[in-house]
Image (cartoon, rainbow, N blue to C red):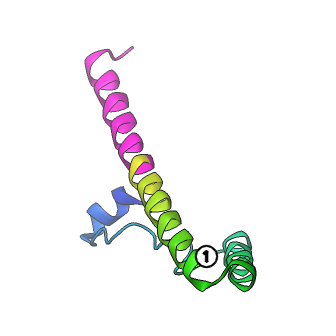
Amino acid sequence: MFDYISAIYYGEGFGACRPCPLDQPADQRERELNKQLDRVADTLGEDFVKTLRGNLRVILNGRQLEAFQDGVRMGGQLTASILLDPQ
């Protein structure tokens, strides 16, 4: 996970979210997903897989954004809890 505190401290940019696993697989599981999609293309055709990959990109990128937003909200709530009710 990206260390935002260190980035702020050292004046580094945050950059973008991690690339979509379909475009830049980061681990074996993501590489295997791409291999499976290639096998599906052999059976159902490239047009079908192109549409499927597009739909998966939308879903995966949306989940990344939702996870980031949830984390920011949780961090804000934790901070507010510490500041408003220190015990």
Looking at the picture, which amino acid does disc 1 mark? Ala
Tell me the residue at 35%/56% (across/down): 5
Q: Quadrant of residue 27?
A: bottom right
Magenta segment's dominant SS is helix
Task: Determine whether, in the image, residue 53 is placed left or right of residue 87.
Answer: right
Query: Residue 64: image x %, image y %?
Result: 45, 56
User: Residue beneath label 1, please?
Assistant: 26
Q: Nearer the viewer, residue 25 or 14?
A: 25
Q: Is residue 61 magenta?
A: no
* The C terminus, quarter of image: top left
**Percent from the top left, x then y, of residue 63?**
47, 52
Q: Is residue 16 left or right of residue 49?
A: left
Image vertical order of residue 77 relative to residue 59, above or below: above
Instruction: Name the residue at 33% across, 22% down.
Output: 81
Mark 1: give few (<14), some (14-19) or many (20+) Cα within 10 Å.
few
Q: Position of residue 59 (x, y in %)?
A: 48, 57
| Tally of marks | 1
Let me know if residue 1 appears in the view.
Answer: no
**Which residue shows up at 31% across the image and 72% down it?**
15
The residue depicted at 39 percent of the width and 66 percent of the height is 17
Q: Between residues 54 and 21, which one lies in front from this camera angle?
A: 54
Q: Which residues are magenta?
A: 67-87
Along the viewing direction, whichever of 13 and 41 lies nearer the viewer: 41
Q: Is residue 43 visible?
A: yes
x and y percentages locating residue 45 in the rendered image: 65, 83
Does residue 16 appear to the left or right of 26 in the view shown?
A: left
Position above or below: 42 against 62: below
Front-lying residue, 74 or 78: 74
